Image (spheres, coloured by chain):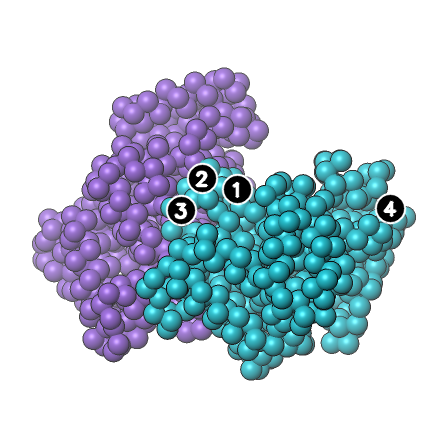
Chain colours: A purple, B cyan
Amino acid sequence: MHNFVFHNPTKILFGRNTIDALGPESRAWGQRGLLVYGRHSIKDNGLYAQVTAGLQAAGLEIAELGGVRSNPLLSQVREGIRLAKEHQTEVIIAVGGGSVIDTAKAIGAGALVEHDVWKFFTGKKGIKQTLPVTTVLTLAASGSEMNSGMVITNDTTLEKFGFGHRLLYPKVSILDPEATFTVPPDYTAYGAIDTISHVLECYLTTADPDTPVQDRLMEGLIENAMTACERCLLDPCDYNGRANLLWTATLALNGLTAAGLGRVGFPMHLIEHSLSALYDVPHGAGLAVVILGWLQHHADTCAPRIADLGKRIFPSLGITHADQGAEQTIDEMRRWFCRMKAPVTLHDLGIPASDIPQIAENTKGLARLWRLHDYTPELVAKVLQRCL
Amino acid sequence: MHNFVFHNPTKILFGRNTIDALGPESRAWGQRGLLVYGRHSIKDNGLYAQVTAGLQAAGLEIAELGGVRSNPLLSQVREGIRLAKEHQTEVIIAVGGGSVIDTAKAIGAGALVEHDVWKFFTGKKGIKQTLPVTTVLTLAASGSEMNSGMVITNDTTLEKFGFGHRLLYPKVSILDPEATFTVPPDYTAYGAIDTISHVLECYLTTADPDTPVQDRLMEGLIENAMTACERCLLDPCDYNGRANLLWTATLALNGLTAAGLGRVGFPMHLIEHSLSALYDVPHGAGLAVVILGWLQHHADTCAPRIADLGKRIFPSLGITHADQGAEQTIDEMRRWFCRMKAPVTLHDLGIPASDIPQIAENTKGLARLWRLHDYTPELVAKVLQRCL
């Protein structure tokens, strides 16, 4: 096991009727709030009315930034920073999925500096302080509700960059499974696949072969992401199905799985970020395609590890041999993605093979920032060839 | 899944050479420190010299409370409170296992009040504030290094009481597997059994049958406690064996396993506390006996759950049927305890059957405090009959 620091200070309130706590929990961090949310869903399902009433009842003065879209944009972050400065915001309240929470985090970092917030993403400036962020989560996927990461797309340069900083943990995150009942089947599956990818990145890129504590945790999370997703697609209002998916997604990227693994990479995210920056595909849909291509490309070099995973999460395959087991595991995962109606090829995403060089070229900036030096455009193109 | 709050603010520094950080990490919380430690081991293995040099180098003035014994005593806590008040202690530094850390926590709570500290344990007073505690852990067992609990034995009344409070999380805990290389085989096994018991209490007393996220986590932790313990007994200086045991023990009782299970009880600990209060047996040794008796007593009523556990952690048993599977699981656990040279009967602990009524009677106070109303002395005596 490698050395690590684990320090996750986010307070999680999980369960039914927990959204009532948003007002007092946010008020504890300030009186002037900026409420950040997405496009239609929280107004359609009543969450917006509930949240604003609760914030007002707790004595918060609220400015609003609505309309945050998935694959969240730098231009919206800049608009939020302008609002936060204008209203002397003391606390940022995110109500939405990972895109909304990441936008809130970026606003919270950018509101306290004079320079442009993108300089944090390119590594030209370091975060020294942030505004506190509280959240109500509405999508089981990103893990941002309990981690120190954020991902934003620069809509001018078409770069989708992400990074982590210890000051970016939300102070409080409220996870009410009922707030996810209205997530449609496709985004439910994309969220589960995002969760699976977060675990796979750590499971398959660690160089430490002797981490059984983390391995059992990670295998359990993948197994649960799959079974809980199936339950939610069968019955979108299955409370425990939604609850299991939500808590699995949070645990999948809150620092626990990676603690002790040493340096892990996020090569699948590197490639997917290029896809969603250029084509605005849903992150989890892009990941479904990239996961399968990446696994195929590594079916030889990572065979024992992929087969070990398959033994645990697909016991009915009866895997006994590494090479064969890796192929069986990848095939079974593809079948599962198909059953969840997720795309499994670039073609399914409407992306032609002829675009591969451009997609690969777009990964260069992030590969440098993430120090994924092996991931040259040539290697990325090879992986993408496996996504056809 | 039940509603829950999860908020664990302890910062963990894990790995080789992390003990060097104790000075600066403690100094961040104050300048006048009280160093709490046990009897011989940290002076024998050089840890005492290393720690005191580091604390002095960081500019801390140190008073000391050494000699804390396992099943830590209220009289020692009171002595520590006297020292902390006399020296106007600002931060308490625990170097040891759970007994030392619990003593430090109790001193940290008691040093800020005028009334006797035992009133916190009997529920007559509530904790309002505590002194910050930093720790260096030397035994994989209690989980106290990353949780809000503490257990102290009143050496006048022979009551061993424990409870949790959100202000009792250590600020920083340093976990260096090398600091556990000198733990002898018996205490290594007792620590692993303590860890297993923490998971079992939650796994078997939850009333919620639909918590697969927590179940996979718990099964993995039990599996790892066993395999890591075996490695440490084969080679006490197996770094990854010690590391896996240490991290497993911490994760087994840091709030994660119980989050979402609803109300769980600690009936095995209830009964064991009576054993170690009356006979001063090592906590993990007492637990080995009580676990087996408790499982036998519940082999019928909890059969499906025990069998499910066995399917996962002992796949070679090929369990297919609940009743039979429960018995097979209990037998296999007994065999494993025996292989680890742990006691498996009251006789092995040197406790005669004729003492059962007295042991059962001693559980009454804690059963009331822990609201284990089913656990009358009559029921406890029945469980203890299974421990013969």
Asked if marks 2 and 4 fall on the same chain, the answer is yes
Q: Which residue is mark 4?
A: B85
- Can you tell which of label 2 and label 4 is closer to the viewer? 2
Image quarter (top left, top right, bottom left or bottom right) of the N terminus of chain B = top left
A141 relative to A378, above or below: above
Q: What's the distance in space between the residues labelled 1 and 4, CA to CA?
A: 37 Å
In this picture, residue B171 sits left or right of residue A117: right
Of the residues under marks 2 and 3, which one precedes in the sequence? 2
Image quarter (top left, top right, bottom left or bottom right) of the C terminus of chain B = bottom right
Labelled disc at residue B209:
3
Q: Are marks 4 and 3 in contact (CB under 8 Å)?
A: no
Labelled disc at residue B2:
2
Instruction: Decide which of B88, B361 is in the foreground and name it.
Output: B361
B321 relative to A191, above or below: below
Q: Read off the chain for label 1.
A: B
Of the residues under marks 2 and 1, which one precedes in the sequence? 2
Identify the residue shown where x is 22% and y is 42%.
A233
The percent position of residue B319, horizontal first and vertical second, equals 35, 66
Q: Read off the chain for label 2.
A: B
Instruction: Decide which of A335, B252 is in the foreground and name it.
Output: B252
The percent position of residue B284, horizontal first and vertical second, equals 64, 65
Residue farthest to the front, as pictured: B354
Asked if marks 1 and 4 fall on the same chain, the answer is yes
Q: Which residue is mark 1?
A: B263
Q: Are marks 1 and 3 in contact (CB under 8 Å)?
A: no
**Is residue B175 shown to the viewer in this render?**
no
Of the residues under marks 1 and 3, which one precedes in the sequence? 3
Can you tell which quarter of the image residue A178 is in? top left
Q: What's the distance in space between the residues labelled 2 and 4, CA to CA?
A: 42 Å
State the SS at label 2: loop
